Amino acid sequence: MSVRDAVGVERRDRSKVIGSALAVGLVSAASLFPIFMSARTIAEFNDAESFREWTVVNDTVMGGVSQSSFAQTEEGNLLFSGELSLENNGGFVSIRNRPSALSLQDAGGIELRVRGDGRTYYLDLRANNQRMAGSFRSPFETLDGEWQDIFIPFDSFVAQSFGRPLPAVRLDPAAINSIGFTLSDKKKGPFQLEVEYVRSVEDDSLVDSPQPVVLTSIVRQRQLIELAIERGVPLFNEGSPAACAAIYEVACTALLAMPDLPDSVAASLSGALAEIKSVSSPTRKAWILRYALDDAFAALARSTG
């Protein structure tokens, strides 16, 4: 083997090693996008028996005519739906579960996975040491038809009674024994909120967040594409197209494994992965995958309007 050949082999091997190492890092980063790592489920709905613990409380208790109900979806989620009315000074609908020991003394907040209708809902917490009717609540915004992962720290919850805030009343996580959802946005009409689960989060690093943290599936997908391009471009420009292609290939594969990827994006990425199987040039592979990632990013950006 000549010196030139040896150098070429060494360069290709080094390129593969770099690409593999960064690809592993990319996969690790992708796995962190559902950022709530230390969580315990306190409400899930795949068991029909769990719905016995829930009840409806609407403005009918004070003369209103709003209607709501809850049901289990085919996927095993909770569907809270109905119609909000402002007649007779009404304007709220809610559901809650029956009191039980939730053991949240070590938690920093609540994580939800929900799919809403673009309206703003409240997450309600009730405590066993409350002296009057009401709850601790925090609002969370939803996107129409889009799944969202939402974290709400306990310090975002404000005590209220009949809609009147009680800022002097502090929430004790250890005393929480009931959770619920309320809609009272003063907008009449139909609504629906689908909930996959409710979890308590014990990761202290999330407790200091002053507002709910929302990462939609589309946001996570776009972040992964940005990360892949950020890592791949320098490698390509430094003469390591194989390493760049490896990064892009892992990103495409990881995207296809993520939930709620639009069908058009999935088809484009799958097509690119199939195309590179018959391509020997690392440079060509990198460009095929890069074009697919660019198209995917643009499509995801359009879908968020």
Image (cartoon, grey):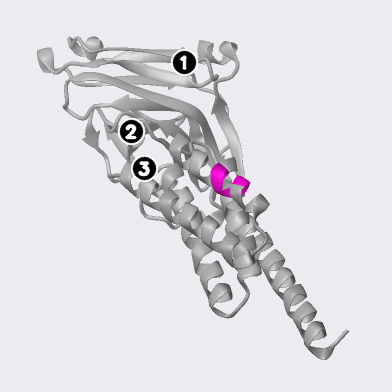
Kindly indicate whether the residue at mark 1 contacts the one at mark 3 (C-beta within 8 angstroms): no
Query: Is the residue 71 above or below the residue 263 in the image?
Result: above
- Label 1 sits on a secondary structure element that is strand
- 143 relative position to 128: left or right: left
Percent x, y of residue 278: 66, 51
- Label 3 sits on a secondary structure element that is loop
- Span of residues in magenta: 270-274
Q: Which residue type carries mark 1?
A: Trp
Cα separation, mark 3 vs mark 1, equals: 21 Å
Q: Quarter holding the C terminus?
A: top left
- Write down the residue under mark 2: 122
- Along the polypeptide, which appears first: circle 2 or circle 3? 2
Of residue 265 and residue 186, the one placed in the foreground of this image is: 265
The image quadrant that residue 274 belongs to is top right
Cα separation, mark 2 vs mark 1, equals: 16 Å
Question: In this view, which residue lies farthest toward the bottom?
Answer: 3
Q: Which mark is residue 209?
A: none
Residue neighbourhood size for the residue with mark 2, other residues' Cα within 10 Å, grouped as few (<14), some (14–19), many (≥20) = some
Q: Which residue type carries mark 2?
A: Tyr
Q: Which mark is residue 54?
A: 1
Percent x, y of residue 118: 28, 33
- Along the polypeptide, which appears first: circle 3 or circle 1? 1
Q: Which mark is residue 157?
A: 3
Q: Residue at x 51, y 55 (%)?
A: 224
Residue neighbourhood size for the residue with mark 3, other residues' Cα within 10 Å, grouped as few (<14), some (14–19), many (≥20) = many
Of residue 267 and residue 168, the one placed in the foreground of this image is: 267
Of residue 172 and residue 12, the one placed in the foreground of this image is: 12
What predominant SS class does the magenta segment belong to?
helix
Magenta stretch encompasses residue 250: no
Of residue 22 and residue 78, the one placed in the foreground of this image is: 22
Residue neighbourhood size for the residue with mark 1, other residues' Cα within 10 Å, grouped as few (<14), some (14–19), many (≥20) = some
